[in-house]
């Protein structure tokens, strides 16, 4: 079996965990290509939340995100015979999902409806952050969380589609610059530039919620 | 990892954009959502397996792979089309510029026999009619001799003689210049060769004796043609070639402006008509320009003839 890490070009800079993950994905992909259709379910279970998260943060609509995520998996399943392992399956799947989402956003540029998920306040990070924000405001926590969530999505939607994609992949999904560059088919410098510009815009939009 | 968690659990003094985006990361769907997602995805996956993709979707990938070659392929196609069009245009132009059946070069390229046989039929209608009339005269030239020497085969022998005489007459007819210029000594030489070929069998078998009278008639005609044909041809061709020169000599160069009556001249004549009883208006208008120029009044006579003072019954007129 060929190691996927040897076949990567730009992905060679990825972390060792990414490389191991890519090798495991490639093995499953080979099974699917050999005719084991059920093996594809493992890939779905592994990546559905991450793919859905990327699409959801780009669209700010859970129904659209669900449809686009399903379409991305269907496209990957139909095209898996053409996957040659030159990049990781994770990158390949992300590229399919991001391109589908970008096409969807371009088609529905004038139509944007919020359909937000509930913020899980039980998480330690979110709880500590919400505590820092609500102690001084003194408003109801759930209402404040709802308001902050809407402001965040409004600020995200004010970004252009490429800038929103970069922010989503880097800040929310935690991908590296190189992985984002590979997914978006642009240079690393472009990714960094877009990220810097997007953060400046978000900082201006979310100024009332920021504290120094 | 523990250090990171301890930093996160530390009382937060500042909130940045990254912190707010981490909060956004906590927006996650519930487990029920994933159950429904699983069902919908399964249905779509089965539909994708059952419903095969259309065949044109398979063609789209090779087309997409050749995207980078679209511009060069298009440029090559345009160049090829241009080249073919230019080639086609050149061929059409060459055919259009090809020598017409009436052109001298075409006639000279054709074999002598073919030229002679086709010349009568190729002529335009008036020339053909003239050729037929000339042929009748040539036939008349031949037929008395035929009558003078009656023969059983005379009726059959007249045919080739008439044919040859028709051919010769067609060359003697004042035809268009394109054909007339072809009628030169070479045409006569080919005519002779044709006659010789027709005469040659007569010296052979007994059946060729039937053509002997006609051959003699042809020889006689050829002699007549030799004597008079060349002179006629030269006279005809010379007249044709010198037509433009004769026409230009006979026409006198006249300035077109001279023929026009100047407006000032007409006005002067009209004004002077009552003052000059000797010259009537009709004469002024009908006189030619040369005569009017010669009889133009001088300024002194004009001023002498004009009467500035006039007495008319009860009024006195003074002209300034």
Image: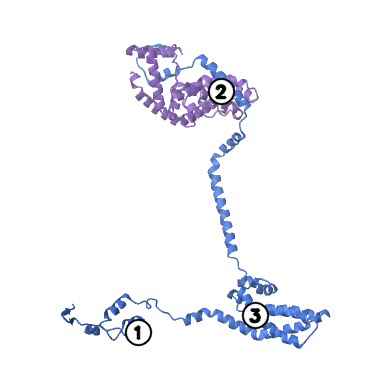
Asked if residue B185 can be seen in this view, the reply is no
Asked if residue A36 can be seen in this view, the reply is yes
The structure residue drawn at horizontal position 59% and vertical position 75%, both measured from the top left corner, is B176
* Image depth: mark 2 or mark 3 in front: 3
Relative side of B272 to B17, left or right = left
Rendering coords of residue B65 (x, y %): 57, 37
Residue on which the image places disc 3: B133
Helix, strand or loop status at disc 1: helix
Circles 2 and 3: CB distance less than 8 Å?
Answer: no
Q: Would you call the spot at circle 2 few (<14 residues within 10 Å), some (14-19), or many (20 or more)?
A: many
Residue on which the image places disc 2: A22
Q: CA distance from mark 1 to mark 2?
A: 117 Å
In the rendered image of the structure, the colour used to display chain A is purple
Say if B35 sits above or below B135 in the image.
above
Q: Would you call the spot at circle 1 few (<14 residues within 10 Å), some (14-19), or many (20 or more)?
A: few
Quadrant in which residue B273 is drawn: bottom left
Circles 1 and 2: CB distance less than 8 Å?
Answer: no
Rendering coords of residue A123 (x, y %): 44, 12
Are the residues under badges 2 and 3 in a single subunit? Answer: no
Pick the quarter of the image with the C terminus of chain B: bottom left
Quadrant in which residue B240 is drawn: bottom right
């Amino acid at each position: 079996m060929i190691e996927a890490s040897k076949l990567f070009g730009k992905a060679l800079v990825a972390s060792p965990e990414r490389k191991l993950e890519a090798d495991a994905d490639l093995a499953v992909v080979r099974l699917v290509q050999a005719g084991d259709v059920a093996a594809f379910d493992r890939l779905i279970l592994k990546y559905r939340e991450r793919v859905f998260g990327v699409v959801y943060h780009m669209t700010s609509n859970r129904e659209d995100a669900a449809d686009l995520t399903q379409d991305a998996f269907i496209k990957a399943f139909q095209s898996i015979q053409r996957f040659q392992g030159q990049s990781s399956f994770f990158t390949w799947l992300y590229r399919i999902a991001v391109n589908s989402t970008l096409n969807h956003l371009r088609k529905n540029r004038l139509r944007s409806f919020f359909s937000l998920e509930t913020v899980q306040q039980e998480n330690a990070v979110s709880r500590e952050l919400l505590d820092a924000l609500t102690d001084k405001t003194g408003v109801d926590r759930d209402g404040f969380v709802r308001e902050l969530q809407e402001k965040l999505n409004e600020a995200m939607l004010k970004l252009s589609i490429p800038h929103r994609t970069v922010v989503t992949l880097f800040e929310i999904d935690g991908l590296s610059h190189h992985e984002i560059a590979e997914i978006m088919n642009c240079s690393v410098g472009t990714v960094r530039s877009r990220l810097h510009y997007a953060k400046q815009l978000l900082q201006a939009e979310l100024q009332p919620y920021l504290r120094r | 990892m523990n250090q990171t968690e301890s930093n996160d659990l530390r009382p937060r003094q500042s909130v940045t954009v990254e912190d707010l985006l981490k909060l956004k990361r906590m927006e996650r769907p519930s487990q029920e959502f994933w159950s429904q997602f699983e069902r919908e995805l399964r249905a779509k996956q089965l539909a994708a397996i059952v419903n095969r993709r259309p065949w044109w979707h398979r063609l789209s990938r090779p087309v997409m792979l050749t995207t980078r070659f679209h511009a060069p392929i298009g440029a090559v196609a345009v160049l090829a089309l241009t080249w073919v069009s230019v080639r086609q245009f050149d061929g059409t132009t060459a055919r259009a510029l090809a020598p017409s059946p009436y052109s001298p070069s075409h006639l000279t390229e054709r074999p002598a026999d073919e030229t002679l046989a086709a010349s009568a039929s190729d002529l335009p209608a008036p020339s053909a009619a003239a050729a037929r009339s000339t042929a009748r005269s040539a036939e008349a030239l031949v037929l008395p001799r035929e009558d003078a020497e009656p023969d059983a085969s005379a009726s059959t022998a007249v045919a080739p003689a008439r044919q040859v005489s028709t051919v010769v007459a067609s060359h003697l007819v004042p035809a268009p210049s394109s054909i007339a210029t072809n009628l030169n000594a070479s045409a006569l030489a080919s005519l002779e060769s044709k006659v010789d070929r027709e005469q040659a069998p007569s010296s052979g078998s007994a059946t060729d004796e039937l053509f002997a009278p006609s051959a003699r008639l042809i020889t006689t005609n050829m002699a007549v043609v030799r004597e008079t044909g060349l002179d006629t041809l030269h006279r005809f061709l010379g007249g044709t070639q010198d037509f433009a020169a004769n026409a230009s000599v006979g026409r006198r160069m006249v300035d077109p402006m001279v023929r026009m009556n100047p407006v000032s001249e007409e006005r002067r004549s009209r004004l002077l008509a009552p003052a000059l009883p000797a010259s009537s208006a009709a004469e002024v208008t009908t006189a030619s320009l040369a005569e009017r120029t010669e009889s133009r009044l001088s300024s002194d006579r004009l001023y002498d003839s004009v009467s500035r003072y006039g007495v008319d019954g009860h009024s006195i007129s003074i002209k300034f």
